[in-house]
Amino acid sequence: MEDERIKHKMVKTDADAAHVQSMELLELNSMSSSSYTDTDAITLEYQSQNRLNFPTLARECDRYGISVRASASIASAVLQDIGIVHEGETSHLVDRNKIRRQSKKHQNAVAESSKCTVSRSLLTGLYFDEGKDKTKVLIKKDTKYYPKTTKEEHYNCKRT
């Protein structure tokens, strides 16, 4: 039994070394970041799901109008460059739905913070204005359309 254990040696591959390096980077990043705790760095080693959040990435992509597909591709490329994602370890890839959810959370937070309730003192009156104007329309006769100018009513709502 002892002889068999000695014969079977574990061979460390480049993928294992890259994985160890990526976990060290994750631990360093998570310890320096205020949004992660020490337990997050420890649990990341054992998780097969990507539980990392990217709120800043989602905010910047919203700001500059980058699509969620492009931003997910960029985020995955950055994670690959720093060694978190490699050929053997793909559980930390960023999906476009993850960016979409983060973007939606950010948009909801901004909408909540900027909500302004209208008090009765700000709203002194609500008026409706009615008028008639000339509008060009197309009238269908048989299979042809003919242009015609008609008078149509329109309503405006004014707040003072």
Image (spheres, rainbow, N blue to C red):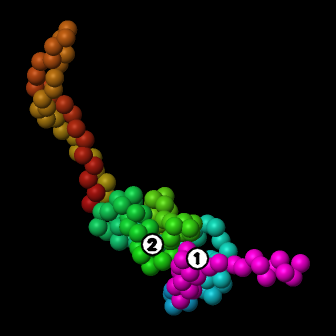
What is the three-letter code of the residue carrying label 1? Answer: Thr
Q: Secondary structure at mark 2?
A: helix
The residue segment tinted magenta is 1-28
Which label number is shown at residue 80? 2
Left or right? Give the position of 22 relative to 111: right
Magenta region's main secondary structure? helix
Q: Is residue 99 magenta?
A: no
Reply above or below: 153 against 138.
below
Going by the numbered disc 2, the residue's amino acid type is Gln
Q: Report whether 88 appears left or right of 72.
A: right
Question: To which quarter of the image does residue 66 belong?
Answer: bottom left
- In this view, 97 is above or below 27: above
First in sequence: mark 2 vs mark 1: 1
Quarter of the image for the N terminus: give it: bottom right
For this view, does 87 lie left or right of residue 153?
right
- Residue 130 appears at what percent x and percent y? 22, 40
Q: Which residue is mark 1?
A: 13
- Give the residue displayed 61% in from the left and 66% down from the top: 49
- Which residue: 61% across, 86% down? 37
Q: Residue at x 56, y 81 (%)?
A: 17
Q: Is residue 23 magenta?
A: yes
